[in-house]
Structure formats: C-alpha cells, structure tokens
Image (tube, rainbow, N blue to C red):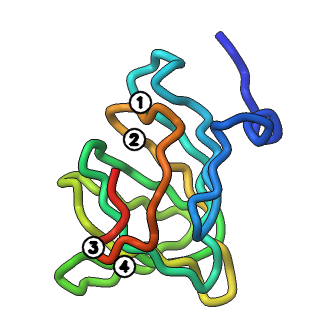
C-alpha cells in the first residue's frame, strides 16, 4: 500500500502543464496497477483538440464546468457529477468553462508512463 498527494506529485515529473491546464499523474505505469489516475485541470476559456490513440480515457468531473465536443459537432456540457468516456480513441475538443476551470479525475487504460505531453500546436490535434 502507498499514499500519494497532489503537493507531493507537484515536485516530480508526474506533474505536467499540458498547455491548457495541469495534470497530476497520481498513478502511472510504474505503479503496476494497470491504469493511470490523474487529477486534471482544464483552464477556463481554453480549447484543445485531443486524441488518445494508444489509451482509452474516462473523465469524472469533480468541480467546475466545461464541455467536450465530438467530431460530429455534438457538444456535451460537463459539470460536477458528470463522466465522459472516450471509448473509441475519440478525437474531441475539450474546453474549460467560461468562468470556471474544469476539474476532472481522468483514468487511462493502458496506463501512461507519466511523461507524455500534448502538442497543442498540431493542427490535427494533440495525440499520444
């Protein structure tokens, strides 16, 4: 058993500023659990085109608001208590709220190494 907290993670390479927010990678591949858990913040008034080609992701909102949009133009408002699931390596837009950050618990399978970084300048979307 072990215990890890956000402040502890901030002192390591497991803390990532991904361009439009931050990701505390609380569990990674090295922890041997078979999945990753992240505390993810999406900054208010931000937008990112993302796709996880090598991972499935589920995100549970614990605070704030934002939205996710699929490539068919369907926009889903996300607020505390909502979960969204990218079960087909879905390319999507992720947006923080107009006045609030979107705070998520993000689960990845298979697990991240913890050092992955987004490239928000990639016109076809950030992929890893």
Q: Are marks 2 and 1 in contact (CB under 8 Å)?
A: yes
In the image, residue 28 above or below residue 63: above
Q: Are marks 4 and 1 in contact (CB under 8 Å)?
A: no
x then y, percent, for residue 123: 32, 77
Count residues near mark 1 (Cα–Cα under 10 Å), then give few for <14, some for 14-19, many for 20+: some
Q: Is residue 62 visible?
A: no
Separation (CA) of disc 2 from disc 4: 20 Å
Judge depth for marks 4 and 3 and give the one in front. 3
Q: Which residue is mark 1?
A: 35
Q: Which residue is mark 3?
A: 124
Judge depth for marks 2 and 4 and give the one in front. 2
Separation (CA) of disc 1 from disc 3: 26 Å
Count residues near mark 2 (Cα–Cα under 10 Å), then give few for <14, some for 14-19, many for 20+: many
Local secondary structure at mark 2: strand
At a point 69% along the width and 15% down the height, the residue shown is 2
Separation (CA) of disc 3 from disc 2: 21 Å
User: Which badge, 4 or 1, is on the more N-terminal residue?
Assistant: 1
x then y, percent, for residue 5: 76, 34
Q: Which residue is mark 4?
A: 76
Local secondary structure at mark 3: loop
In the image, residue 114 above or below residue 33: below
User: Which badge, 3 or 2, is on the more N-terminal residue?
Assistant: 2
At a point 58% along the width and 70% down the height, the residue shown is 20
Local secondary structure at mark 4: strand
Q: Which residue is mark 2?
A: 108
User: Which badge, 2 or 1, is on the more N-terminal residue?
Assistant: 1
User: Which badge, 4 or 3, is on the more N-terminal residue?
Assistant: 4
Q: Are marks 4 and 3 in contact (CB under 8 Å)?
A: no
At a point 33% along the width and 78% down the height, the residue shown is 69
Q: Is residue 103 visible?
A: yes
């Amino acid at each position: 058993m072990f215990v890890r907290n956000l402040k502890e993670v901030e002192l390591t390479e497991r803390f990532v500023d991904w361009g439009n927010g931050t990701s505390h990678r609380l569990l990674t591949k090295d922890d041997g659990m078979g999945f990753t858990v992240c505390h993810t913040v999406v900054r208010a008034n931000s937008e990112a085109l993302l796709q996880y080609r090598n991972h499935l992701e589920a995100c549970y909102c614990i605070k704030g608001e934002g939205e996710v949009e699929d490539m068919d133009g369907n926009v889903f408002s996300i607020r505390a208590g909502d979960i969204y699931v990218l079960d087909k390596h879905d390319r999507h837009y992720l947006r923080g709220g107009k006045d609030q950050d979107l705070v998520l618990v993000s689960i990845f399978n298979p697990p991240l190494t913890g050092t992955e970084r987004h490239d928000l300048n990639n016109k076809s979307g950030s992929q890893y």
